[in-house]
Image (tube, grey):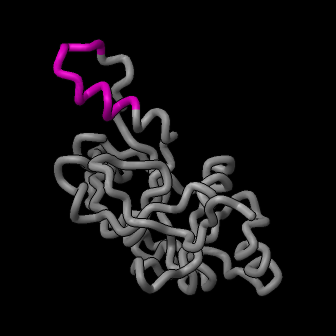
Amino acid sequence: MPLSAVNLPYFKSSLDRYEQGDILRDVTLIQWADLDMERVLSVVERTLQYCVILSQECDLEHDYNTRAKADGATKDKYLQTLLMSPAYQAETFRQGEHLQQLEMKMERINSDTWHRIKQNNVARYHYLEPHQDFQVPELVVDFKHYVTVPREVLYREQFNMCYVATIEIMYRDHLSRMA
C-alpha cells in the first residue's frame, strides 16, 4: 500500500513565491506590436485569461532564496523574466477561436485529435482538467505560444491577485518535460 496518494490535480500553495505549474488568471502583459508604415513601434496591453508558469522549479526557488538573503550575495541566481504559456479555455480552443483578441482564426480541432489532446498524447499541447473547487476550467496549453514576463512585474503587481492554483507535482511532470 502506498504511503501517500495524489487525489487532486491541483492544490493551493502556501509559498510566497511562484512555482512551476502555477496557474494564473487575468495576467496583464505589455507587448510590442508591429511597426507601422512609418516604422513607429507601438506597445499594446494584452490580458491572458489563464496562463501557467513554465520556468523550472529549481530556478524559481534559487531566485527567491537568493533574493531573500540579506548578506549581499551575488546575483547570478536571479531570474530577469519568468516563462509562461497561455492556457486557453478548452471550448474556444477546440473551435479555433482562442486567439480572437489577436484577430487570428486558428484551426478547429477534430474529435480524434481532441481525444488525444485530452489524454496528453499530442506533444504540442498539455490538457488541464477542470476542477470547480479550485476554479480551474477545462484548459489547454499550447507550447508554441509562450511569453516571458519581467519577474518584478509579476511579483509586485500581480502576485496575490492572479494566483488560482498549482498543478500537483505528479501532474506537473508531463508539463515540465514538454515545455
Give the quadrant of the N terminus: bottom right
Q: Is residue 73 above or below residue 122?
A: above
Q: Is residue 46 above or below residue 151?
A: below
Q: How many marks do you count on the picture?
A: 0
Where are the magenta residues, as a range?
62-74
Q: Is residue 28 visible?
A: yes
- Residue 142: x, y in percent? 60, 62
Q: Is residue 39 left or right of residue 71?
A: right
Q: Is residue 36 visible?
A: no
- Residue 133: x, y in percent? 41, 83
The residue drawn where x is 57% and y is 64% is: 141
The residue drawn where x is 49% and y is 72% is: 99
Residue 178 within the magenta-colored segment of the rendering: no
The residue drawn where x is 34% and y is 26% is: 78
Q: Nearer the viewer, residue 45 or 11?
A: 11
- Residue 158: x, y in percent? 22, 57
Q: Is residue 8 above or below residue 73?
A: below
Q: Is residue 12 left or right of residue 99?
A: left
- Image quarter for residue 170? bottom right
Q: Is residue 124 left or right of residue 104?
A: right
Residue 67 within the magenta-colored segment of the rendering: yes
- Residue 64: x, y in percent? 31, 34
Q: Nearer the viewer, residue 153 or 133?
A: 133
The residue drawn where x is 49% and y is 68% is: 10
Q: Is residue 107 above or below residue 76?
A: below
Q: Nearer the viewer, residue 2 or 65?
A: 2
